Image (spheres, grey):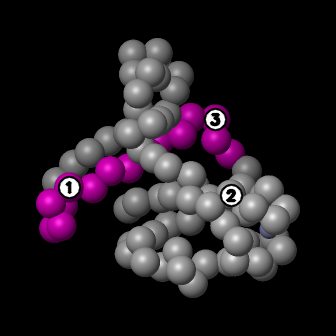
Amino acid sequence: MPIYEFKCLECENMFEFLLINTQETLEMNCPKCECSNIEKMMSTTHYAVGVSGTGTGPKAQTRSCSKGSCTTIDLPGHSR
Ligand SMILES: [Zn+2]
């Protein structure tokens, strides 16, 4: 399942959201201040670059699914 990270431009709250359809971002609001002025923090590609091989960074996994390929991110130590 694709999980995306977002940042609220109003209160700078960062949160993660599971998106089945990326068009859902149009209807999303910040869970903290409920404004719709949010920015999508991408991407899986940026996470993967430069951290591979360290064993401590986020790991992106691409695998086959019904839509072709899905990318999931594993964020170690990313708890909230
Ligand atoms: Zn906010």
* Image side of residue 75 versus residue 73, left or right: right
Residue at point 16%, 67% (across, down): 66
Tag in front: 2 or 1: 2
Q: Is 8 drawn above or below residue 35 in the view shown? A: above
Q: Amino acid at mark 2?
A: Lys
The image shows residue 48 at horizontal and vertical percentages of 41, 32
Q: Is residue 57 magenta?
A: no
User: Would you identify the image quadrant in which residue 2 lies?
Assistant: bottom left
Q: Return the mark for residue 7.
A: 2
Mark 3 element type: loop
Mark 2 element type: strand
Q: Amino acid at mark 3?
A: Gly
Residue at point 56%, 35% (across, down): 76
User: Would you identify the image quadrant in which residue 65 lies?
Assistant: bottom left
Q: Which residues are magenta?
A: 65-79
Residue at label 3? Answer: 77
The mark that comes first in sequence, 2 or 3, is 2
Residue at label 1? Answer: 69
User: Would you identify the image quadrant in which residue 13 lies?
Assistant: bottom right
The mark that comes first in sequence, 3 or 1, is 1
